[in-house]
Image: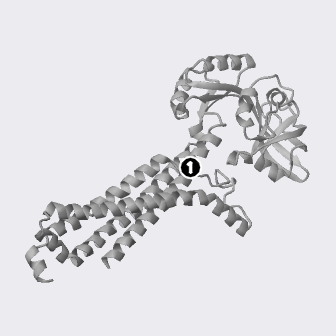
Amino acid sequence: MSGFLSRLSVVGLTLAVAILLAVLAVMNGFEREMRERILGVVPHISIHGFADLKAWNQLQADTQRAPEVSGTGLFYERDVLAVQGVRVTAAKMLGVTAPVWRRWEIWSKPSKLTLEPGQVVLGAGLARRLQVEVGDKLRVIVPGDALRSETLPATAALHVVALVDSGTELDEALMLADFEYTATLLGDELTATGLALQLQQLFKAPEMRWQLARTLPPSFYVTDWTLRHGNLYAAIRLSRDLVTLLLLSIIAVAAFNVVSSLVLVVIDRRGFIAMLQAMGATRQDILWIFLLQGLWIGVLGASVGLVLGMGLAQLIPVLASGLEWLLDGKLLNTDVYPLNFLPIDVRAGDALWLWCTSVVLCLVAAVAPARRAMRVPVAQALANQ
């Protein structure tokens, strides 16, 4: 019975470690893709305002000199209606300069293209809703300026030259076009509506936003990525911490099964323990025997669990694809979730602390049975044999 419980403790610890490592790999994957795919293309800091092009160029030159800034680019935003046959959807048409376009270009198909006037790049989700492909024509309706009653809405026919498929929620409303073409679509004088800044360290964005807000003229206002995507990033980190805490409790329960198994070993082997002591084994020797048994359960269970967990983590995308095929639908959709796939990121640091935590818990759990074993009365135990 005691041997069965020892093996059961190893199996429980193995499963707990494997499941926790696999779940952490998924949560780490979401965090990595959020940082690389979404925060890699959206501006870390955006400066909006009303100014002529000369003022924008001067502002761009001034901010570019800051050591924290890795890149800048002017853009022009317009709210438009995209029309394809009977399908109509609202979108934000973003006129971008070359530095901004290069960040999106890595997700575009085809890539390595130059945006010309009259050309547009759509997000894959938006293109899917409109049922357009590369090479199709797309009509957009641009509302007039609300501050200028004489400005009438304009209609433009755009040529779809590429699709951006980043696999994120950004694809659902993305429409990129040439900066100058977008800015002058209603016959306005060429200017910008914003300046995008990319930082060397994206987590310094709130600090720099406050610095810019104190120094810029009142006609400008500053936002950063934490205002638009910060809640999502924080939710992913919080979910990761909560799942880790929950599954660590399972590991703790599995590790402390060592207590019950070793207590039964002490009860079943009282005579043998007494014989060892009669043959010259000290109490410290008995203590170390049971501590080493607990340590061995922890090392074996944690090591096998890490191997199984790594294998399970690699199987998760395959299992998800199989489930999607079976259900004939997407498990994740960017209409609801930030990504449309399950990313995996197995980190050596997670595996190391998980292994160490499991082994330490098993070792701690073995202390009480070991102390009980070292106090077995030799004469009484031998008399009961």
Asked if residue 210 is positioned above or below residue 3 in the image, the reply reads above
x%, y% of residue 146?
78, 35
Asked if residue 368 is positioned above or below residue 171 in the image, the reply reads below
Three-letter amino acid code of the residue under disc 1: Asp
x%, y% of residue 181?
84, 29
Its colouring scheme is one colour
Asked if residue 352 is positioned above or below residue 99 in the image, the reply reads below
x%, y% of residue 8?
39, 72
Determine whether, in the image, residue 13 is placed left or right of residue 60. left
Q: Residue at position x 49%, y 53% from top?
A: 240
Q: Residues within 10 Å of mark 1 (few under 14, many from 20)?
A: many
Rendered-image quadrant of the N terminus: bottom left
Q: Give the number of marks.
A: 1
Determine whether, in the image, residue 48 is placed left or right of residue 274. right
Please state which of residues 273 and 250 is positioned toward the viewer in this rendering. 273
Please state which of residues 46 and 333 is positioned toward the viewer in this rendering. 333
Q: Residue at position x 67%, y 16% from top?
A: 58
* Residue farthest to the left, as pictured: 379
Asked if residue 131 is positioned above or below residue 12 in the image, the reply reads above
Rendered-image quadrant of the C terminus: bottom left
* Residue corresponding to mark 1: 345
Please state which of residues 20 and 271 is positioned toward the viewer in this rendering. 271
x%, y% of residue 163?
80, 43
Determine whether, in the image, residue 44 is placed left or right of residue 136. left
Q: Secondary structure at mark 1?
A: loop
Q: Residue at position x 57%, y 49% from top?
A: 29
